[in-house]
Structures are given as C-alpha cells and as structure tokens.
Amino acid sequence: MTASDKDTVDLDMNALDALFAQATNDVGAQPSEAFMTRVVTDALAQQPMPQIVQPSLWAQITAMVGGWQGMGGLVAATCAGFWIGVNPPEGLPTQFETFLGSETSISLLEDGIEDTGMFGFGWDMEEG
Amino acid sequence: MPLDAYTDLADDALLAQYSKGDAAAARALTARLTPRVFGHAVRVLGDRAEAEDVAQDAMMRLWKVAPDWRMGEAKVSTWLYRVTANLCTDRLRRKRGVGLDEVDEPHDPSPSVTDQLQTRERMDALQAGLQTLPERQRQAVILRHIEGLANPEIAEILEISTEAVESLTARGKRALAQALAPAREKLGYEDDSI
C-alpha cells in the first residue's frame, strides 16, 4: 500500500471511538481556574439575597408576652379574673360594694347637712 | 449545609438552594456544570476565548432563571446544553466565511511533555476534523460521542427528533473518519492499532 492509498482509507471506527474516549478526558477542554472564578463571581453577584421573613403581628405580640407559655398564662389569668368577677367567693367584697363605699360617704355628707344644719359656708357667714 | 451534602443533591435542588441565597450552592453548581458547558463550547467553536464567552453567557442565563425554575419540569443540564448549543450556533453564523485555518485550535494550558505530544496531536486533529463537519452534525457528534449523552436528551437539546439525532451522529461519524483519514499515520493509526 502506498502513502497515497493510506490517505484514502477512512479512519477505523474503533480508532475513532478511542479518539472520542481520549477527548472525553482531555484536559485541554477543561476551563481554567481563572475562568471558573469568574463564573463563581457572576453567580454570587446574581444571587438573590437570603429572604428575611417578617413575623406577623400576632407572632410579634406572642413573642412580647413570652411565647406560647406566656400567652397561656395570660389567658388563664384573664379567665380566672373574669370568673372571680362573675362569681366572687364568699367574703370578697364585690366591685359594686367597693364603689358603694365611696358613695356612702357622699351620702353621709349630704345627710349631715340636712340633720345638723352645719354647713361650712353658712357657719362662715355667721362667724363674720 | 455541609459541602459533602451538595454532591448528593440533584441539579434542580441545588438551583433551589442557590435561589435561597446559599453561596455554597452557587459554587457547587459552578463546579458541576461549567466544565461541561465550556467543554461543549470549546469543541464546537474550536476557540477557548470564544468558548469562555459562550459558557459565561450560558451560566449567567442559568443564574438569572434560577428564581423562576420549576422543580422537576426540565433537566437543568439539558436546558443548559440547549442554551450553549444555541449560543454556539449564533457565534458560528456570525463567523461564517472565516476559513478553517483561521479558527484557533484549543491548546492545553499546561506545557505538553514529550509523552503527551501524541495525545495532544490526536486531540488537535480531532478538533480540526470536527471543524470540517456541518454545525448540527458537529454538535450531535460531540454530545453523543464525547459528552456521552443519550440520543433522546440530544434530541431535546437540539430540538429535533431522536431519529434525526441518530442520522446526524451516524453521518457525522462517517464524515469525521473520512476527514481524519489523511492524519492516520501521523496519529499512530496507520495499522489501525490504537
């Protein structure tokens, strides 16, 4: 076979497959470190910022009173207070009675004026 | 998340992590996908600088689309190969008319040692042979025989039927064997021994 004959013979398919296999692992087709760094820089520049989730108003209130434990205590105290208000235990003056106490003193003052005739303004006038 | 955990994550899961602001996911995706994108571009274009431009552009498109990526709908690597293939096609169309001699051949960035010379020559000859193929044939041959993708995935990337891929790769391989015939002796294949 002459050199010109060889030139006309196609490359064997097995040889071509071997060439492909070599190409798959060819370092010449690998990107450089500098290029990889450029791509990472792009990636980080384009990356969305980590999202900061704003807690809801309810979550903020719950956190303020000490989480769900605090909120539980607050609810229990509210219920207890409400029940004591509706059905007070024996011997505990009711809210109405407490108010009546101050009203009584006003009533005594008015009664005093009527019964004794002593009234500060009138006494002052007599003195003068 | 520890770095080891990223190796087990699928590409789309990594992309979701990236969208949440995870910088390590950005690095992991870059390390995983950029060599594939660049490798395809450099073989199709035959020019490292142009391949870098194309690969950087393709990766940039991936970063931009990441927040809207729908998990499980498309394969990230297929999408990326398609973007790269289209960018390469655009470049080649713009370059049409430039002779093969003017197209740079890729070279090893590290200096070749004597026992690597033949490998380098073979790779350069393969690259030169690939450049003689029509653009679609070249893309199909590279994806099938060098990137090792399956025909249905190549069909998705090139947006053609699987039968068309089979035809392209078969014709491409025959044309490549013909193009490399003059270099058989130089490449050490004169007796078809590998």
Image (cartoon, coloured by chain):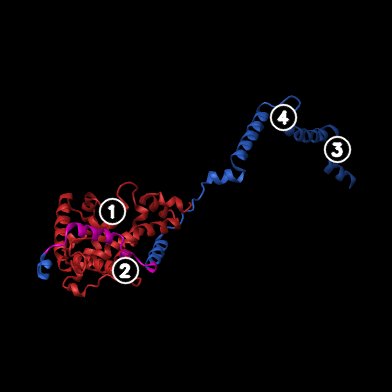
Chain colours: A blue, B red
Q: Looking at the picture, tell me which residue is in the foreground, B139 or B113.
A: B113
Q: Residue at the spot x=25%, y=69% of the render?
A: B121
Residue B37 in the image: above or below residue A64: below
Task: Kindly identify the amino acid type of the residue bearing the numbered disc 3.
Answer: Met
For residue B115, the mark is 2
The residue tagged 3 is: A118
Task: Kindly identify the amino acid type of the residue bearing the numbered disc 2.
Answer: Asp
The residues tagged by marks 4 and 2 sit, at their Cα atoms, a distance apart of 105 Å
Q: Earlier in the sequence, mark 2 or mark 1?
A: 1
At label 1, counting other C-alpha atoms closer than 10 Å, the crowd grade (few under 14, some 14-19, many 20 or more) is some
The residue tagged 4 is: A94
Q: Residue at the spot x=63%, y=33% of the render?
A: A76
Q: Which chain carries label 3?
A: A
Q: Mark 1 lies on which chain?
A: B
Question: Where does residue B36 sit, x and y in percent of width and height?
Answer: 31, 59
**Is label 2 on the same chain as label 3?**
no
In the structure shown, which secondary structural element does the residue marked by tag 2 occupy?
Answer: helix
Q: In this view, does A67 lie to the left or right of B37?
A: right
The residues tagged by marks 3 and 4 sit, at their Cα atoms, a distance apart of 34 Å
Q: What stretch is highlighted in magenta?
A: A9-34
Q: Residue furthest top?
A: A90
- Asked if the magenta segment contains residue A51, the reply would be no
In the structure shown, which secondary structural element does the residue marked by tag 1 occupy?
Answer: helix
Residue A88 in the image: above or below residue B7: above
- What secondary structure do most residues of the magenta stretch adopt? helix
Task: Kindly identify the amino acid type of the residue bearing the numbered disc 1.
Answer: Thr
Task: Kindly identify the amino acid type of the residue bearing the numbered disc 4.
Answer: Thr
Q: In this view, does A26 lie to the left or right of B185?
A: right
Residue B48 sits in quarter: bottom left
